[in-house]
Amino acid sequence: MMIGTYAAFYSIDPGGMSLFAAIIMAMIFGAIASVLVELVAYRPMRARGASRLYLMITAMGVNIFLPNLAIQLIGGGVRAFPSDWAMYVVRLGKVRVPRSDILAFILTVIILIIIWLFLYRTRMGLGIL
């Protein structure tokens, strides 16, 4: 997720892409990063017959390594996301909700439905369960 966010950030700021093009770029870079982690970290361990405990420990190691690598390469300072789109709010009665929160909710629901369909409706997904 962090890699995708950095991809979107640098696509908008110096790259000049629109927000939605940057979101697509973030998904592409996130998918590439996931495949690389699978090929480099998990697949060799599965080939050796590692238990799930070792795979979980590897996941924790990757989750410690990648953010620290980003801090070393890019820096740990806080940056504002360069998009005015998220500043607008939608009024729902007396409640004001930023458009970015609405988008995040909608995308989360869509992604969860896709994951559920994959896990419960495909042969590969049933093999995971």
Image (cartoon, grey):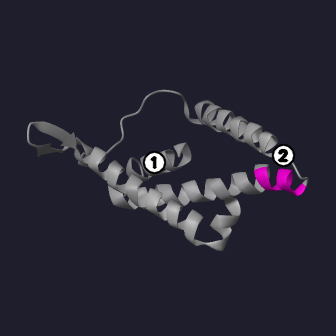
Residue, disc 2? 51
**Residue at 40% across / 60% down in the picture?**
110
Q: Quadrant of the C terminus?
A: bottom right
Residue interval drawn in magenta: 42-47
**Residue type for callout 2:** Ser
State left or right for residue 65 relative to residue 31. Answer: right
Disc 1, SS:
helix
Disc 2, SS:
loop
State left or right for residue 47 relative to residue 2. Answer: right
Checking the image for residue 10, the label placed there is 1
Q: Is residue 56 above or below residue 39?
A: above
User: Which is more N-terminal, label 1 or label 2?
Assistant: 1
In the image shown, does 9 or 104 lie closer to the viewer? Answer: 104
Q: Residue 50, percent across and down?
A: 86, 48
Let me know if residue 116 is in the magenta part.
no
- Asked where in the image residue 121 lies, by quadrant, the reply is bottom right
Q: Residue 81, percent across and down?
A: 36, 40
Q: Is residue 25 above or below residue 73?
A: below
Q: Residue furthest left?
A: 93
Near mark 2 (Cα within 10 A), the count class, few <14, some 14-19 or many ≥20, is few
